[in-house]
Image (cartoon, helix red, strand yellow):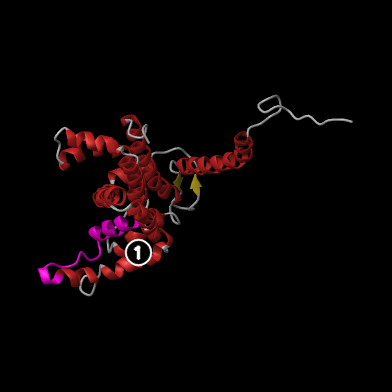
Amino acid sequence: MTTMTTAPRGGFGYRHPRMRLAGLLSAPMAWLVVIYLGSLAALFLTAFWTIDDFTGQLVKTFTLKNFQQVFTNSAYYGVVLRTVGIALLTTAFCMVLALPLAFFMSRVAHPKWRPLMVAMVLTPLWASYLVKVYAWRAMLQPEDGVIAWFLSPLGLGGPGYGFLGIVITLTYLWLPYMILPIYAGLTRLPNSMLDASSDLGAKGGRTFRSVVMPMIFPSIVAGSVFTFSLSLGDYITAQIVGGKVTMLGNVVQTTYVTNLPFAAAVATIPVIIVLLYLFAVRRSGALDNL
């Protein structure tokens, strides 16, 4: 009679399930990294080429002509500043709106209602991007829009299409990406710290500034990475509700057919800005405690 023996747990030949899962995922992840980094490398490389004016063919010779044109032409330089300003304002508005909403969800609402409220925050993300933007186009109409109708008794007009319309629409689109990180940070905030602040005589405002904000600052930064980067690369919203206002994405859209290297140079600028933003966030240490 023979008995079967198995390798002891943790012995030679044994592989932990997590190790086996990592081995299965390593090949797809490697391909994703290669494709993603390869695409970025192709983008950066093309940005330093030019187009022959006579033949329309690519001239694969290194030059900084495209970037010089962006930063010396006042029109393109203004588009860069406008796009960054829209992204910063959108991030600021998302933060102002997300803080009280996330605080109510995590600290005021009854625990049994919190999953429902999180689902309600996520619900707009399930709707079509274009449907939401066109809905805001209808609401932002200068005379017949809902916002203009609401503000007319106050003697105020609607924002209409333009810079402010883009910021309002982008704020609505990316607000959930700011609410959820802040909500997660507030749920991890110990009640003992709030009680200790109250016992030491701090009022609500002082507790919020000195205790709550430092604790959830990494969560705010994490949310800002999403809202800032998504707003920086958007172009459809500007095309629908921006009127005559253009962003960097619109420049790429209109030039990539006739001048691919210049479009690549313009598309490189948001990537560089986001990388600098991530570098500054990393140096600040804001993400170490997430």
Q: Quick one: label 1, few (<14), some, or many (20+) residues within 10 Å?
A: many
Q: Nearer the viewer, residue 110 or 256?
A: 110
Left or right: residue 203 compared with residue 253: left
Question: Is residue 12 inside the magenta stretch?
Answer: no
The x and y percentages for residue 70 are 32, 46
Q: Nearer the viewer, residue 18 or 76?
A: 18
In the rendered image, the residue lying farthest to the right is: 1
| Amino acid marked by disc 1 | Val
Quadrant of the rendering where the C terminus is positioned = top left
The x and y percentages for residue 253 are 40, 57
Q: Secondary structure at mark 1?
A: helix
Which segment is the magenta one? Answer: 152-173
The secondary structure that dominates the magenta segment is helix
Does residue 232 appear in this view? no
Q: Nearer the viewer, residue 107 or 276?
A: 107
Left or right: residue 48 compared with residue 207: right
- Residue 15: name its quadrant: top right
